[in-house]
Image (cartoon, rainbow, N blue to C red):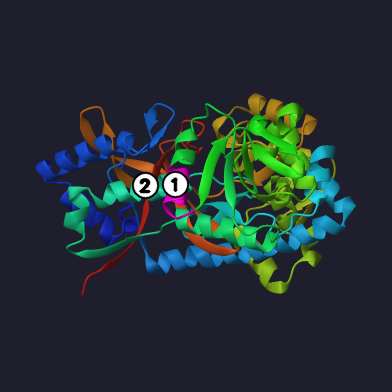
Amino acid sequence: MAHRAPADPAAVSDPVRAWHDLLGDAALQAESTGRLLELQPERSLTFGERRICRTLRPNLLTAERYQRAIQAARGVHSALITLERTLLGDSELRRELELEPEEERLALAETGHSHSSPSMRLDSFFGDEVRYVECNAESPAGMAYEDMLASVFRELPVMRAFRRRYHARSLPVRTQMQSCLLRSFREWGQERRPVLAIVDWPGLPTANEFTLFKEYFERHGLQTIICEPADLEFRRGRLHAGSTPVNLVYKRVLTSELLARPEAARGLVQAHLAGAVCVVNTFRGKLLHKKVSLALLSDERYQQLYSSAQRKAVARHIPWTRRLREGSSSAAQKPVKDLVQHVLKNRHKLVLKPNDEYGGKGVVLGWTVTDGQWESAVKEGLERPSVVQEAVPVPREPFPVVLDDSVQLLSLAVDMDPYLFHGRPGGMLTRLSSSELLNVTAGTGSIVPTFLVEERR
């Protein structure tokens, strides 16, 4: 196994060393590589045409480190729920989100169950401390991929050898998602037997994940269809997908994209407003999904909204984030007379993000561009809703990566993104990249499963 750009040895845990030592056996490495590449297409583990994982090691996490991650997630989630409640009752604060009128109308409609975003993902970098940089409250992806990748890694010869020395337990997520859907359906309470529609546009590179969900749900007794928004029709008080009445929607389609095509959106929107269908996540999830939501956590002007414990969690785990606009602000608990000038002068430690995009679209890392490019990006950010955020340290770890006909040990950036279901952490998406912008949708990332590890006694 060739080596390149090794990570700090102090950051490499003993289980990681043990795994890499096993790959020093050329026969074990070759057999494991072959199985990793063979099993992914067989199990629909592709994103479009490419395998979602070319990394010959999972994320190996100790129980102590996992507990730190989920404790941080609980604290931040608590503050987010407080923010959402405040937003629902405060139209002036809601204006900070720059919602489209139809987004706001749908967000304010009754949902029929207790959580606007029963499933949520908090995207983080976990170096010395957990730092959450985004909240995916609308349509968190990757769950089924994580489960199936874990099943692939369990079958690798290197994992079997590793388990002679370490206990290794994966973190199942699809079962949590099904429980989340069924709990929401029970709270909605209009009908007894759920019929689920997974709804998104056809032809997306994520389509394989919908198939994996459908197979899992049906294997566990939940009737499921996959359809696009235009297939849904609201007639005689019920939502139909073709000839099939549905009463539970797993909404993977993004609200902004749905509302951009009102003809396709009509059936689902009508059924939702009539209370004739349970939608997960709800349209109200857009409130926290807007990236300005983290600015409303971070900005000192809004600290009175939160409890002492919530303020501590935000200070510890949310980087400085502000809505980009003319005027004064604050940074490092000091007044900033001109926010735009502050942003222009500090590009080397700031990130610029559109308020409502995904897949890394429009994200500008200040230290990777010239002064002129940053000035242009800031000017554009002032013309459309955007946020500016303090850059956080991106942890890097050595991972064995399959490149053509060899395996090379590369230093990769890692983000670990816990899923929460009705506020309870359950599973994790782990993404790796050689670039600092980690996103599988953008083509700059790879997914690996997470295993909790403990040395055998």
Tell me which residue sits at (52%, 45%) in the image.
224
Q: Which secondary structure lies at badge 1?
A: helix
Query: Could you tell me if the residues under marks 2 and 1 are in contact, i.e. CB atoms within 8 Å?
Result: yes
What span is in magenta?
212-221
Residue 406 magenta-highlighted: no
> Disc 2 residue type?
Met
405 w.r.t. 428: above or below = above
Residue occupied by mark 2 = 148
Screen quadrant of the C terminus = bottom left
* Residue 133 visible: yes
Task: Between residue 371 and residue 288, name the one nearer to us.
Answer: 288
User: Can residue 220 be found in the magenta stretch?
Assistant: yes
Which residue reaches farthest bottom? Answer: 457
Q: Which secondary structure dominates the residues rendered in magenta?
A: helix
Q: Amino acid at mark 1?
A: Ala
Query: In the rendered view, does 347 fall on the left or right side of 177?
Result: right
Give residue 144's mark: 1
Mark 2 Cα shell of 10 Å, populated few (<14), some (14-19), many (≥20) = many
Residue 123, given in percent of the width and then of the height, sits at: 55, 50
Element class at badge 2: helix
Task: Please name whichever residue, 191 or 359, is drawn nearer the observer in this view of the structure.
Answer: 191
Number of numbered discs on residues = 2
Residue at image position (50%, 59%) is 176
Instruction: Classify residue 35 by image quadrant.
Output: top left
User: Is 58 on the left or on the right of 371, as rendered?
Assistant: left
Answer whether residue 415 is visible to the viewer in this image: no
The answer for how far apart the CA atoms under marks 2 and 1 are is: 6 Å
Instruction: Tell me the number on the disc at residue 39.
Output: none
**What residue is at 46 percent from the left and 33 percent from the top?**
444
